[in-house]
Image: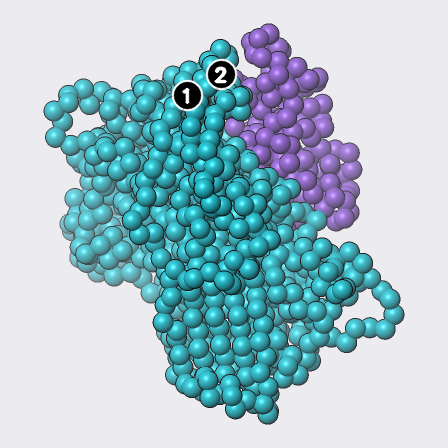
Amino acid sequence: MTASIGIPRQVEELLTTHRRGFLKSAGLLLVGFAAQHSSAAEPTGPYPDPDFHQLDSWIVIHENNTATFYVGKTDPGQGTGTGFRQLMSDELDIAFDRTTCIMGSTDITVDQGGSGGSTAMERDSWPMRRAAAEARRVLLEMASAHLATPADQLAVTNAVIASIADPSKNITYGQLIGGKKFNIALTGASVNAVTGAAKVKPVQQLKYTGQSPLRDDIPAKVDGSLKWAVDVKLPGMVHARNVKPPFACARLTGIDESTVRNLPGFIKVVSKGNYVAVVCEREEQAIAAARKLKTTWEKPATAPFPASEDLFTYMRAATATSKPNPVVVGQPDSAFSGAAKVIEAEYEVPFQGHTAFAGAHATADPSNGQMTVYSNDMKSYGMRNGVAQFLGMPRDTVRVVWMQGPQGFGRTAAEDAGFEAAWIAREIGRPVRMQWMRNEETAWDTKGPAFLVRLRGALDGDGRLVAYEYAARSCDYNHVGYNEHDTVLIAQLMGSRRAKPASGSASLPSDVYAIPNRRMVGEVVSLPAIWETPLRTGNLRDPNGPQSTFPAESFIDELAAAAKADPLEFRMTLLTAATTDDTGFRRARSIAVLKAAAKAYGWDPRPSPKPIPAGKQDMLTGRGIAYSFRGQTIVAVVAEVEVNRQTGHVWAKRLVCAHDCGLVVNPQTLHHTVECALLHGLSRAIHEEVQFDTERVTSVDWVSHPTLRHADIPERIDIVLVNGDPNPDRPDLPPYGSGEAALKPMLASVANAIYDATGVRIRRVPFRDARVLAALNPL
Amino acid sequence: MSNITFKVNGATHTVDIDPATPLLYILRNDLGMQGPHFGCGLGQCGACTVLINGAAVRSCILPASAVKGEITTLEGLSPKGHLHPLQQAWIDEQVPQCGFCQNGQILTAKAMLDKNPHPTDAQIRQSMNATLCRCMSYYRIQAAIKRAAKVMSA
């Protein structure tokens, strides 16, 4: 078997041309592994970590004067890979179209953690930029010697270094170092701190940054030529499918292999503890065998969870498993007791699924004592460590080759199929392709935690907000982390238990409103069962942000209505009141973003709700605003909705979003990312909820866990990239994260618009037709 | 098992297969196609869409024995490397995020435009409504369809 089979096309070409020979000579890495790993006495495995302190690990210059960037990130489709190329091309001074970027394969790119938390530009682009700047510095030094000209008398244009006085004296990067190593050590205590001697350029000198070159991954995604992780085929590869427990916390009591033994292509039933899978020669055979295999199971003695319709009753009554100290400002108790008006409300956000567009999948190759997992895991480095620990293999005998896959919104941070494929592959000694079926993925993927939030607010006689109380309970707290060998589902089913499950707090609202007296607390409650259950929680895009922002920004609207104030002006008053908190100019930028959204929408100040017009028309319209921030990225959204009084159907007819994430690397990809995040928020607002009875999740497909569809799309979406601090005397802002923030205020903006249209406040997500209709026509 | 012959993107293939096998697995695993994807196996999402005699069909629930006609996959839209106007519009509008569903979006749009070259916005929404995108790239898909419709009718 050759090592390059199944590797994504881009990587394969590099490995078989430049990189393989280059890296062998650099001693960084051995590929073409099968030929070299015949001796059991090898002191190290085939996949040592690429050294982030070596410039050669980040940048390779080829003889044809092109460059390849190697970065430890994954780009599941928001264009970060193109953004990295823009920034690194700028720092290296090379034409953008003479570069490529390789991402996320653990044996050839340094460990930057993969993707997650909107960190790509905010945190991880910096070491890339500094490495590229250092490469430029080193090349200038080399050119100086070669051209016998002091470096400060040389200029670089598109990877050609020339004498300023005599441009005919020049040399290209490729001529200087093409195909050879830099051999330059970088410094910095961690990968995030990696730096050379060179400084990065000021923003004004960045040429590609701020432009919108087309995303480099799109052509192969529309002509069918992309090799996705699902497309990996290896010689001798077989297909596996799981047999999931029929109930949460079920104990396997028997497997009747005779029910599948004679099926065509049947190879084996593999099982350990409560984990069961079937392996067959062909994919459709494995699917059929997994359905036909007879297994028997014992139910747990007590119900693992309440049914979904009883979830919030349960959450109200449960004893908190994590009870952080409240955040208290001023004297909330006395402020409440002396207030002119006190209002309170309770909000509910159910479990929502990641529901990746295709089930978890991976292919594992166990040949020659190593393990290669081909996966779309966004955190491929975590999977590599997790698989090594799970299988008890040395880290440097395991690699994960990252490839493109379906969007998962954080699902692949705990990517079960890679662990399953690797375990089965080792059991049977053949390459294994594992894929989860739709019902399995929707029922058993990780869930975004459910939230129950009680809010109380006090207004003085002038309608000013003088006291505020936020008490959240989340169920539970993203307890399945990042590809941990002891929390992935296969480990749980095989009996792994953490002595102490991860605990944390329910998140608090993100605002910089000046409210003199506040008390905020975020408790966690757990379901009776937390292991071997399909209601396991994991990070879902902006893990708890939408759940805390929906109540918080809905309730600000309730307070505005109680004060008979315009909802935008009510917020502006809270933001313009005196406060000392202006980290990252966040308050000034919050004001700017709200103003920009209102201006783009054409907001006319008036209190909500809008007077319901006389007559009996079915359609009511309204507008709602909400604002939030994630890290330093500030977002305001205005939603305009139509509510059908006869059916309860809510259509967001128009969305306006003002978005400030500091320096914009690629306006077009940012615009698109924001647009899709808004619509994901809209989907969570009007459609998404995980339903379950007392022993299993009953949301198993796109009917029982619906998602946004073409007909739901607003007829107009306006996105304003506010892009930076409104005060021209302040320095440029760095890039902040943008993958998640726009989703955060989306749910509240729709709820506020429904209230504006109808005068009815919906405090429970999702706003499906039946729920809205019932709220419009109370019994 | 039985020999079944398929015409895919102009080429003829004979496969010895259980006739109940859904077409999707044959296209992907026997004929090496990477356009059609498994998304749900239930005909709900559209990721597995192929054209059969020009109609958009969900290959994940279509038994091999029921295939009657010539199959076109996403790869077949640009046989000699010349992108179909829909594919070009998808690039021009920078439609995909992850891109996993776009096979179904493009082929469903093609079947629609072949029948109705000048769809209204409402007709686009209606015709595309059962083809899901979990990244929510819908807004750009609809823009790309309108762009392609203009090019195709010019």
The reply, left or right, for residue A757 in relation to residue A517 is: right
Q: Quadrant of residue B129?
A: top right
Nearer to us in this view, A744 or A389? A389
Could you say where residue A113 lies in the image, as x and y percent from the top left? 32, 48
Element type where label 2 sits in the image: loop
Q: Are marks 2 and 1 in contact (CB under 8 Å)?
A: yes
Q: Amino acid at mark 2?
A: Val
Q: Report the residue at 51% width, 63% height from top.
A: A316
A700 relative to A85, above or below: above
Residue assigned mark 2:
A260
Q: Which is more N-terminal, label 1 or label 2?
A: 2
The chain containing the residue under callout 1 comes to A
Nearer to us in this view, B146 or A705? A705
Q: Report the residue at 43% width, 55% height from top.
A: A526
A128 relative to A51, above or below: below
Residue A469 seen in the figure: yes
Q: Colour of chain A?
A: cyan
The reply, left or right, for residue B42 in relation to residue A373 is: right
The reply, left or right, for residue A432 in relation to residue B131 is: left
Residue assigned mark 1:
A269
Nearer to us in this view, A102 or A320? A320
Element type where label 1 sits in the image: strand
Residue A232 seen in the figure: no
Q: Report the residue at 57% width, 86% height from top.
A: A459
Please determine if labels 2 and 1 lie on a single subunit. yes
A145 relative to A560, above or below: above
Q: Colour of chain B?
A: purple
The chain containing the residue under callout 2 comes to A
A71 relative to A204, above or below: above
